[in-house]
Amino acid sequence: MALAAGFVRVRILSPFDPAQDPHTLISESYQAGAPSLLMAALPYGNLQETVPIPPHEQVAYIAPFAQRNYYREGVKRLQKLGATLRTLYGGRRSDFRILCNSPVPEKPLAQAAGLGVLGRNGLIITPEAGSLVIIAAMTLPFFLDQDEPEPGLHQEEPFPWCVYCDPDQPPCVRACPTGAVRGDGTLELSRCIQWYASGHGRTVPLEIARNWGNRLYGCTECQDACVHNQRTIPGVRSSEGPLPAYLDPVALAALSDEELKARFKGTAMGLSWLGPQGIRRNARLAASSP
């Protein structure tokens, strides 16, 4: 049913005790009355329409993963699935709790469920859609048998899907413009453009600003370089929070807080931790790019 709803990969994690599971470190607030967890990957793919940069205009680029609100799309599809499951098998709405872009550590959950494996760039790689997915989960108030591990999708050895790459200088490490990708599955956040683009850091160091380019939101260099993302990967269609590929950074920087909130409400850039100040800072950095 989840696959029919557009999720490209679905796995069941059982038994699931949010208060005790060592893989997840989820607080008891997510209640232990959920013996199974449905883990799902929703693909945004790499087939977004290519829009040429307007000639003689200063533009700020929005990465493909933010050109639609895929997190909201994933939640909406899981909500519909949860309603169907309640009709078929009973339970309350609160029994089918959805976790998507939440404080819950998604990557350990994804690995434990066999949704994908961790790459050297610190992202989860799925067999069907590489790392071009958002991860979502839904608690289930009934027990389902856990999916059996698949060959190559368990991490008894680190980075089993990065064997195609030079372990000393993998493509994702070489591609990172600021050296944030360490190649050991972690990022040096203080050097990561996307970390700053998401509203973190009081100021952007000069070295990071020099490599900012025309980005308004989203740095995907390490994903673009990953061998698992080089094939054609279809994404789901979504009308949630549409944003164009390019916006005018000078015009954005001149908007008031309320105008920026209204412009990005419901989009992937309308998140509380980014806020008007973060958007305005990103726009100014993009506008100052040569």
Image (cartoon, rainbow, N blue to C red):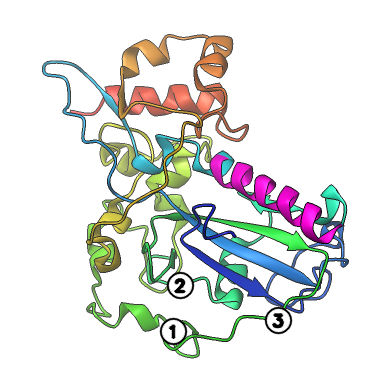
Along the horizontal axis of the image, is 281 left or right of 75? left
230 is higher (above) or lower (below) than 58: below
| Circle 2 SS class | strand
Look at mark 1 in the image and give the residue it sits on.
Answer: 158
If you read the primary sequence from the N terminus, does the residue marked by circle 1 or circle 2 appear first? 2
Look at mark 2 in the image and give the residue it sits on.
Answer: 118
Q: Which kind of residue does numbered mark 2 sit on?
A: Leu
The region drawn magenta spans 73-90
**For residue 248, which numbered disc appears in the image?**
none
Along the horizontal axis of the image, is 1 left or right of 193? right
* Contact (Cβ within 8 Å) of mark 1 with mark 2: yes
* Quarter of the N terminus within the rendering: bottom right
Between 96 and 226, which is closer to the camera in this rendering?
96
Q: Which kind of residue does numbered mark 3 sit on?
A: Asp
Between 186 and 40, which is closer to the camera in this rendering?
40
* Residue 37 colored in magenta in the image: no
| Circle 1 SS class | loop
Using a 10 Å C-alpha cutoff, classify the residue at mark 1 as few (fewer than 14 neighbours), some (14 to 19) or many (20 or more): some
Residue 8 coordinates in the image, percent (x, y)? 46, 60
Look at mark 3 in the image and give the residue it sits on.
Answer: 145
Question: Residue sitting at 69 percent across and 70 percent down?
Answer: 24
Residue 203 coordinates in the image, percent (x, y)? 47, 35
* Contact (Cβ within 8 Å) of mark 2 with mark 3: no
Using a 10 Å C-alpha cutoff, classify the residue at mark 3 as few (fewer than 14 neighbours), some (14 to 19) or many (20 or more): few
Between 110 and 3, which is closer to the camera in this rendering?
3
The residues bearing labels 2 and 3 have C-alpha atoms spaced at a distance of 24 Å
Along the horizontal axis of the image, is 237 left or right of 232? right
| Circle 3 SS class | loop
* Contact (Cβ within 8 Å) of mark 3 with mark 1: no
Using a 10 Å C-alpha cutoff, classify the residue at mark 2 as few (fewer than 14 neighbours), some (14 to 19) or many (20 or more): many
The residues bearing labels 1 and 2 have C-alpha atoms spaced at a distance of 8 Å
Prevailing SS of the magenta stretch: helix
